[in-house]
Image (spheres, grey):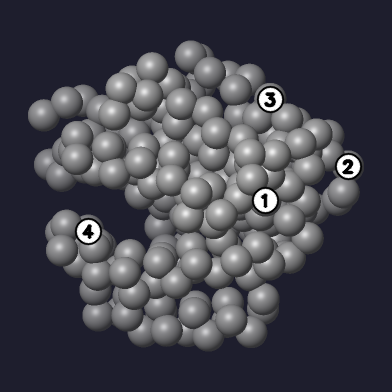
Amino acid sequence: MSPDFFDSSGEVQKHGDKLPHWQQDGVMQFVTFRLGDAIPGEKLRLWLEQRKVWLTHHPQPWDAATEATYHKEFIGKLERWLDQGAGSCLLRDRSARDILAGALMKFQGDRVEHQAWVIMPNHVHLLFTPHAPLEKLVQAWKATSARLIGKGGIWQRNYRDTLIRDADHFANAVRYIRRNPVKAKLPESAFTLWQSPRAERL
């Protein structure tokens, strides 16, 4: 198995209190974070309640079938809400996206190795290998971009992450990132897509 991919027998670092974030040395992550106003509060509260019940019956680690069910039942719904363009959609503005893109790429090849990412009007999807603690990378991206954009605390508190299991999972993540603007019916002026040579070959 490629060292890029999750090894279920290997050591995993966990952090976070509610739904722990997992990190394994050298393993790629698919990460999503969003603007704080991207999902209406009432919808989000109901989603969190339903997910909490489901998670008590399906503790991690998950097999591929259980993860697919989770994504269908919960992540798919969340992504549809995001793609509907709720909230301020601050990142629809090219200058704000350029600031975030600069923050994302600042440590490329050092603390992080990006494979693909897309900045949507109210959320971001990233596929990368972290070479630093995952939570520190996300915190730095959010803090730097928020400070430079100058609109205050624009980001949600948390983020969603998934360890990449295998080559098929990697390919699916790349294609999801690439297709997200198409699925959301965005004009080219409303998003920024970046792909590595490895991702572009898919």
In the picture, the quarter occupied by the N terminus is top left
Disc 3 crowd, CA 10 A, few/some/many (<14, 14-19, 20+): few
Looking at the image, residue 117 lies above or below residue 66: above
Whether residue 167 is visible here, answered yes or no, is yes
Residue picked out by circle 3 = 102
Q: Earlier in the sequence, mark 2 or mark 4?
A: 4
Left or right side of 182 for 55: left
Q: Where is residue 54 in the image (x, y as percent from the top left)?
A: 32, 80
Left or right side of 153 for 4: left
Residue picked out by circle 2 = 150
Question: Residue drawn at (24%, 70%), measured in percent from left and top?
Answer: 69
The local secondary structure at tag 1 comes to: loop
Q: Where is residue 133 in the image (x, y as percent from the top left)?
A: 48, 34
Residue picked out by circle 1 = 121
Q: Position of residue 146 (x, y in %)?
A: 78, 42
Q: Position of residue 19 (x, y in %)?
A: 42, 63
The local secondary structure at tag 3 comes to: helix
Q: Earlier in the sequence, mark 2 or mark 3?
A: 3
Which amino acid, by three-letter code, is at mark 3? Answer: Gly
Q: Earlier in the sequence, mark 1 or mark 2?
A: 1
